[in-house]
Amino acid sequence: MRLCRFNDNRLGVVEGSEVYDVTAALDILPAYRYPLPHGDMLIAHLPAIRVRVTELMPSAARLPLSAVRLLSPVANPGKVIGAPVNYLKHLEEVREQRALNHGNASHSAPIHTAGVFLKATRSVVGPGEGVAVRLPDRRTDHEVELGLVIGRRASEVPVHEALSYVAGYVIGLDITIRGSEERSLRKSVDTYTVIGPWLVTADDIDTPGALDMRLTVNGEVRQQASTALLIMNCAELIAYASSFYTLEPGDILITGTPEGVSPIVPGDRIEASISQVGEMVVEVRPW
Ligand code: MN
């Protein structure tokens, strides 16, 4: 199932070139009071939501996919976990280009040395919201990544069980200011985490470790690779992250970017695709 959020916080199912409006399924979510529990409500209740969605679909209003504004399929992730330098050829380009490593050895350490990092959840947007370049004097790059959304609480999960904790997959753009500062600062600007175009539930993905991804800017191919080339694969990333953090439903793990990162500026049009997940268009604009 391809579950999207669109327009004014509506919930949809994408089939072909249409969106079925199943917003009424959200009525099954409990009424919460402060303090809210950890995790994203929609993802925490995804099995029951799916049942209700299936009931609603035959009578749901349909809209053309091209006419909706896509939001992040996860509205309230508790964490966005990033994987630095998780493709060998990206590691090589970071080591070779001072514009990428800024003489900071920690920028070009492989993932087993560098570990993972956190991005501010406030940076998350959907493809329809676009990227707003906040510091135009700084080099700002695109990074296309396979993202996975955690479906249930996970702590100290073994590698062989790790994929069973995945609710679904997304495309992630890890927009990054190059520079000497900590990753968590340079990658956490508002709009610098684009999640979309929808959540493809895990049962629809055969092998997350064999997906082709591609990113173009203004029609020119900049990044193209397979997730088969991940240094630390999806299951290993979940196991690793869950040995430090308790993962909650709705936590998003973006798995790292392949080679070909390059600058973006206001006016650019990014198209990103991952096989079996989908494709999305993201406009870059001034702050
Ligand atoms: Mn990245």
Image (cartoon, helix red, strand yellow):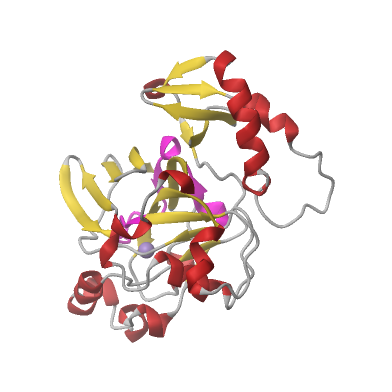
First to last magenta residue range: 121-145
Mark yes or no: residue 120 visible.
Answer: no
> What residue lies at 28% left-to-right and 39% top-to-bottom?
267
> What residue lies at 57% left-to-right and 78% top-to-bottom?
243
Horizontal side of 277 relative to 70 (left or right) equals: left
Q: How many labels does the image show?
A: 0
Q: In which quarter of the image is ligand 1?
A: bottom left
Q: In which quarter of the image is the C terminus?
A: top left
Horizontal side of 172 relative to 266 (left or right) equals: right
Q: Which of 284 and 114 is in front in this view?
A: 114
The residue furthest right is: 33
Image coordinates of residue 146 in percent, x first then y, are 37, 55
Q: In this view, does 64 lie above or below 271?
A: above
* Quarter of the figure with residue 95: bottom left
Image coordinates of residue 92 in percent, x first then y, are 20, 76
Assess whether residue 83 is covered by the magenta stretch.
no
Assess whether residue 137 is covered by the magenta stretch.
yes
* Quarter of the figure with residue 158: bottom right
Image coordinates of residue 77 in percent, x first then y, are 59, 53
Mark yes or no: residue 182 visible.
Answer: yes
Q: Nearer the viewer, residue 81 or 30?
A: 30
> What residue lies at 22% left-to-right and 58% top-to-bottom?
225
Horizontal side of 265 relative to 159 (left or right) equals: left
